Every structure is written in C-alpha cells, then in structure tokens.
Amino acid sequence: MSEALAHASFVDSRRRHIVLVGLFDALDWAGIRPVAPAQLNALWYLANALAPAWRLAPFDAAVLKTERPPYFPMLQRDLDALVGMGMLDVAGLEMDAQRSRMEGRFALNRSFADPVLAIMRTVQEEADLLEFLGEVVQALNRLTDAEQRTGLVEDATYADPDVDIGNVVDLGEWLEHGGLTRTADVLERIEALAGEDLEPAQCMDIYLDHLGRRLRHA
C-alpha cells in the first residue's frame, strides 16, 4: 500500500479543520504555544486512538506503522490550509532532522478562531468534542517532552504485535460502528480492574502514567 493511500482519511477535510481548531484551543489554554509538529502529531494520534472511549468517531482513518512515532502527512496539509484561512499563525520554523526539512511551529489566531469556537460551544456534540480534546492535552502533558516525542511507539494500538512495520494501523476505517481501538479497550479494562465507575479521563490518566513508567524503566 502506498504511503499516500495509507494516510488517506475518510473524514472530510473541513471536519478535521474544525477538530484541529479545537485542539489548538485546548493547547492554548494549557499554555502550550506555539506547537511543534512532533507534539501535534502525537496529540492527533492519541486523540484518534482514544476517541472510541468517548464514543466519538475518529478524525483520521489510519496511520502507517513505522519504527518512528506516528506521523500524519495529511496533517501538514490541514495546517497549511488553516494558516491560509487565518486560523493559525506560523510562529517559527525548526529543522526536522529525521525528515531533513524545515517545519513550522503554529499558534492559534484568536481573532479568527474564537468566533468558530463560540459556535462550537453552543452545540452539545461539539462542546463534548472540545472537552475531550482538553482531556487529551492534559493527559499527554503527564509525559515529558522527550517521552511525548517517542513514547507513542509503545501505545497499545500503534504497538499492536499483529500489525507489522510498513502496514496500516486502523484508527477507525475498518472498525465496526462502536468498535474500540486497542488503546480505548485498555481504558475499559482499567475501569474493570479498578472495580468502580471511573470517567474515561481518569482511565486515560492512569494509562498515560503507566506508559510513562514503562518508558522511564524500560
């Protein structure tokens, strides 16, 4: 399967743009500004892997599994489009040594984004999405910057032993309606083991803490 096909998204680009605006809003509230591409790819991956635990549809179809952390080429196109719309500002450039190219660091342009976010908050489904994205940002912040850059290669979905390097990790394109990624399934098992009702965000925090410990004591 070609890389372009492996990264194709079944989600309309306009929907991904809306989700990205919400993600940058959550990052802004967390004091993370501007955002480096590697961190954004990590968040985008984690949001997709965890979405089923919140009964949300994923925002991307799949990701090509490599020996590196998850990377979404189409995400760069979405960012470029949002810059063109004025939703994002390019706040700096940095060299991606692994891919030998310059990449931008991005920040939300509140003048353009806030009216969109205000409308989203009036729609329950979109308000739930914004809450979820905020939880994902807070959870990933439980890992250090270095762990964020490399740690998701150990995530339950991306590290699935049934998916070989060079094949596609399913983030929702082939899952049955309501089906769980391996990561979302882990969250359900955490709640079962806890023996009490836990919110998905609590299970996510426990999972990220566990992932961090594995990385620190590998």
Image: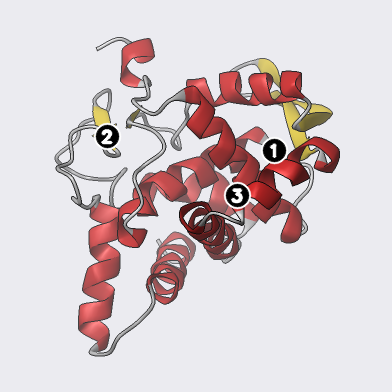
Give the amino acid at mark 2.
Val
Give the amino acid at mark 1.
Ala
Colour setup of the view: secondary structure
State the SS at label 2.
Answer: strand
Query: Quarter of the image containing the N terminus?
Result: top left
Foreground mark, 1 or 3, reads 3
Q: Which residue is mark 2?
A: 169
Give the crowd class for mark 1: few <14, some 14-19, many >=20 residues within 10 Å.
some
- Residue 71, percent across and down? 47, 30
State the SS at label 3.
Answer: helix
State the SS at label 1.
Answer: loop
Give the amino acid at mark 3.
Met
Q: Which residue is mark 3?
A: 120
Q: Which residue is mark 1?
A: 36
Q: Residue at x 37, y 24 (%)?
A: 9
- Residue 164, percent across and down? 20, 31
- Pick the residue in front: 11 or 195: 11
Q: Is residue 155 visible?
A: no
Tell whether 123 sits left or right of 33. left
Among numbered discs 1 and 3, the one appearing first in the sequence: 1
Which picture quadrant has residue 199? bottom left
Tell whether 205 sits left or right of 22. left
